[in-house]
Amino acid sequence: MIRAINTFFGVGLMRPAPGTWGSAAALVLGVAIDRYIGFWALVAATAAVTALGFWSVGRELHGRPGEDPSEIVIDEVAGQWLALLFPAAAFWARGLEDWAVVAYPGWVAAFVFFRLFDIWKPWLVGRADRRGDAAGVMLDDLWAGVFAGLATMVAAGVAHGIIMQ
């Protein structure tokens, strides 16, 4: 079961670029959760997958310091959902429940920025990645999710002229 969780039920076994496949699967599922169950369900799912990821990655990598196998993508799921929470929260706060259909640039931006920060690994993302332990496997993607969420909101502000006014 730990292997199934860590590979996000086999998505991490897809090639090439399993991290991108994991992020894409997370994006589709995250948007569906927000659209059909609601914003607070996405918040709960993000918290649950993050806690589950820390546990399951810790179990799989116990006694294997420094490893970060590419097929482990539960960390991408947690980070991608964290990035998605930023635009979801903004729309939820404005009472726009069906934002996923009409505001596709928000979730596309969250995906693109997340992949950018996850691959580039600037600052805290890289520091977490260099920890060389199971927590670092999760933390680098969570930091990438935070940076992607913030970048998505800045991009939305620029695109809608909020920052320019």
Image: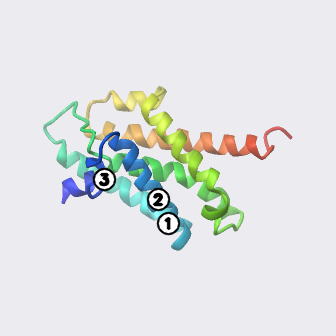
Q: Position of residue 83 (x, y in %)?
A: 52, 48
User: Of label 2 and label 3, which has the lower sequence position?
Assistant: 3
Local packing at callout 1 (Cα closer than 10 Å; few below 14, some 14-19, many 20+) is: some
In the orientation shown, which residue stands out farthest toward the left?
A: 63
Q: Circle 1 — which element? A: helix
Q: Circle 3 — which element? A: helix
Quarter of the rendering occupied by the C terminus: top right
Quarter assignment of residue 39: bottom right
Instruction: Identify which residue is drawn at 77% across, 47% down.
Output: 160
Q: CA distance from mark 1 to mark 2?
A: 6 Å
Query: Which kind of residue does numbered mark 3 sit on?
Result: Val
Query: Which kind of residue does numbered mark 2 sit on?
Result: Val
Q: CA distance from mark 3 to mark 1?
A: 17 Å
Q: Position of residue 8 (x, y in %)?
A: 30, 55
Instruction: Identify which residue is drawn at 81% across, 43% down.
Output: 161
Q: CA distance from mark 2 to mark 3?
A: 13 Å
Q: Position of residue 137 (x, y in %)?
A: 32, 39
* Total numbered labels placed on residues in the image: 3
Residue of label 2: 28
